[in-house]
Image (cartoon, coloured by chain):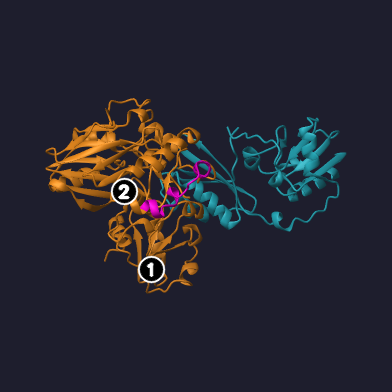
Chain colours: A cyan, B orange
């Protein structure tokens, strides 16, 4: 499975500082929360993209190397991370979910982050349906099961949980805070 | 008007202790790991990507008439930042050509002494990494000790002096930098010497550097006498020149001592290290001039830019030589050690001939501080 991005920046063959200069320019055209792929061959670009994202508030997701091309993935900083206004009441603490996962319980975890975020780091067995696609892909989720909705910080999962319960899903829990604090087992699906 | 300066010019300034303001625009992790140092160097760090929208962060703190040298990893971003500073009205902004990559490869030759019988001894100071290597020159012949990877620098130096390099010697199998000894011997048709005990796994031919087997440079003028001194690696060997200069490799430095753990054998070698430092070296003359293979702090550079010290003085003031109790010593050199040098295992493999990375990869492997010492 490849990694999905909303926009791709080609910085192959360019030396520092050009990969960052191009990335900075391109990300300003991106909508908040969208994902950008930056292709570069400059080895130093990994550390710089990471540090740049940190200093600007964008989210660095990870890097994969394919045929000597480094593909960096970034998610543009978005407001929902900041305001974090919880509207859905049925929440479950991350630690409770952790205990269920560690206890090998059969839990349904719905990860509503972007596919690229999910690809670099998710709970084993979690299903990925990005928040923006949820309306159209609800049939992929079993209505009878208890569903644990998770995102990075609990904001997108809050919206997703509201949508699911409106559509008749019976037991929907919003996991708080989210993957940002998860220190349990994870897996990648970047290949 | 040129707006760039070379590593050569910058090295001269550091050695001559000229006031220098450097703006390092690499990301902060890299800066914290490793940067240009000097007694007269003031350095500020602001990653280039924070300056793309304006250089106010710098302009607010630095006078625009002041000279400022911009440094980055490879020389690209520093040019851009220099241009941005100029646009902002800086009149003396320069960039360092080739960045830290070039700085890490610069060797500054300093003459240590004239030798008996007309020869000379030079120290090559690698300011960007703290490595010290040596060239003994005598009667149109030369030997190079602990050569760094940049063999061309020694070859050009030898050519200028009109000498041919007949021997290259490594005092031990290095773990912090890639040795140029073998390559340099190949280029010049010379002989590469390495201690047997450090060469058990090497994949190439070498001459064994053994106690009692002297190496002659020129017309029998200079004797290099290996003194077996295990501790940093099991084969570590010291060299003596003219009964006056003691090349200690990575066993004894000016302000610190060698660490015994870089091949994963701290416990095994700590006894050897103590034996060398507290017995073998102590029996030698106090007047010997110690010439190590590394330095850690820029204040170890003397007024002429060289790193050296009288052995007797080191027994007075080097903290690594003041530990009376053997247990305390063991603790000091096996516990709370600084992080091991970047890629030290791959560097060892390369120096044994088991790996043969491309030039660009070798450069990357060496980036960063050497961290060969224990500071008491």
Residue name at image x 70 percent, y 44 percent: A179
Task: Give yes or no for residue B316 being in the magenta stretch.
Answer: yes
1 and 2 marks on the same chain:
yes
Residue A3: image tag:
none
Magenta stretch in the rendered image: B314-333
Q: Which residue is mark 2?
A: B290
Disc 2 residue crowd, few under 14, some 14–19, many 20+, Cα 10 Å: many
> Horizontal and vertical percent for residue A79?
68, 57
In the image, B159 versus B51, the foreground residue is B159
Residue name at image x 45 percent, y 38 percent: B260
> How many marks do you count on the picture?
2
Please state, as top left, top right, bottom left or bottom right, where the N terminus of chain B lies in the image.
bottom left
Q: Nearer the viewer, mark 1 or mark 2?
A: 2
Q: Label 2's element?
A: strand
Residue name at image x 38 percent, y 59 percent: B299
> Horizontal and vertical percent for residue B301?
34, 57
Disc 2 chain ID: B
In the image, B203 versus A124, the foreground residue is B203
Q: In which quarter of the view is residue B93 placed?
A: bottom left
Q: Which residue is mark 1?
A: B86
Residue name at image x 74 percent, y 48 percent: A156
Magenta-drawn stretch, dominant element (helix, strand or loop): helix
In the image, A77 versus B233, the foreground residue is B233
Disc 1 chain ID: B
> Horizontal and vertical percent for residue B220?
13, 37
Q: Label 1's element?
A: helix
Instruction: Give the Cα distance between marks 1 and 2.
Output: 46 Å
């Amino acid at each position: 499975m490849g990694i999905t991005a909303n926009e791709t920046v080609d910085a192959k063959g360019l030396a520092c500082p050009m990969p960052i200069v191009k990335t900075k320019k391109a990300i300003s055209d991106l909508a908040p929360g969208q994902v950008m792929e930056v292709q570069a061959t400059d080895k130093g670009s990994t550390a710089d993209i990471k540090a740049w994202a940190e200093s600007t508030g964008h989210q660095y997701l990870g890097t994969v190397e394919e045929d000597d091309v480094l593909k960096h993935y970034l998610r543009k900083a978005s407001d929902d991370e900041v305001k974090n206004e919880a509207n859905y009441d049925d929440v479950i603490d991350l630690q409770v979910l952790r205990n269920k996962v560690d206890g090998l319980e059969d839990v349904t975890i719905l990860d509503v982050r972007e596919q690229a975020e999910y690809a670099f780091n998710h709970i084993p067995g979690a299903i990925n349906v990005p928040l923006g696609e949820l309306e159209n892909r609800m049939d992929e989720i079993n209505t009878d099961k208890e569903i644990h909705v998770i995102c990075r910080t609990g904001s997108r999962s809050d919206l997703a949980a509201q949508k699911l319960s409106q559509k008749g899903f019976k037991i929907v829990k919003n996991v708080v805070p989210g993957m940002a604090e998860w220190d349990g087992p994870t897996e990648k699906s970047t290949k | 008007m040129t707006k760039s300066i070379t590593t050569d010019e910058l090295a001269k300034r550091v050695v001559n202790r000229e006031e220098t303001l450097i703006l390092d625009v690499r990301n902060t992790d890299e800066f914290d790991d490793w940067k240009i140092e000097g007694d007269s160097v003031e350095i500020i760090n602001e990653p280039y990507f924070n300056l793309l929208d304006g250089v106010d962060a710098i302009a607010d703190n630095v006078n625009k008439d002041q000279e400022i040298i911009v440094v980055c990893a490879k020389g690209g971003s520093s040019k851009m930042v220099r241009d941005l500073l100029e646009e902002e009205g800086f009149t003396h902004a320069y960039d360092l050509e080739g960045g830290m990559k070039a700085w890490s490869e610069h060797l500054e030759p300093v003459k240590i002494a004239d030798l008996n019988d007309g020869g000379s001894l030079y120290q090559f100071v690698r300011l960007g990494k703290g490595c010290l290597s040596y060239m003994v020159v005598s009667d149109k012949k030369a030997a190079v000790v602990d050569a760094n990877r940049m063999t061309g620098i020694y070859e050009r130096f030898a050519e200028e002096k009109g000498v041919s390099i007949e021997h290259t010697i490594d005092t031990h199998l290095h773990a912090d930098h890639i040795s140029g000894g073998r390559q340099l011997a190949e280029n010049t048709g010379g002989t590469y010497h390495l201690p047997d005990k450090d060469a058990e796994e090497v994949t190439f031919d070498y001459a064994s550097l053994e106690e009692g087997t002297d190496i002659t440079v020129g017309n029998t003028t200079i004797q290099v006498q290996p003194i077996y001194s295990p501790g940093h690696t099991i084969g570590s060997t010291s060299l003596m020149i003219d009964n006056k200069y003691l090349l200690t490799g990575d066993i004894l430095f000016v302000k610190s001592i060698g660490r015994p753990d870089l091949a994963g054998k701290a416990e095994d070698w700590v006894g050897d290290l103590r034996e060398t430092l507290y017995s073998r070296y102590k029996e030698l003359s106090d007047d010997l001039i110690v010439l190590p293979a590394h330095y850690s702090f820029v204040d170890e550079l003397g007024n002429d830019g060289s790193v050296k010290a009288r052995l007797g003085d080191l027994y007075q003031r080097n903290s690594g030589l003041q530990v009376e109790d053997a247990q305390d010593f063991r603790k000091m050199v096996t516990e709370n050690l600084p992080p091991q040098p970047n890629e030290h295992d791959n560097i060892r493999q390369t120096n044994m001939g088991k790996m043969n990375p491309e030039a660009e990869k070798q450069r990357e492997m060496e980036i960063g501080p050497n961290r060969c010492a224990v500071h008491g």
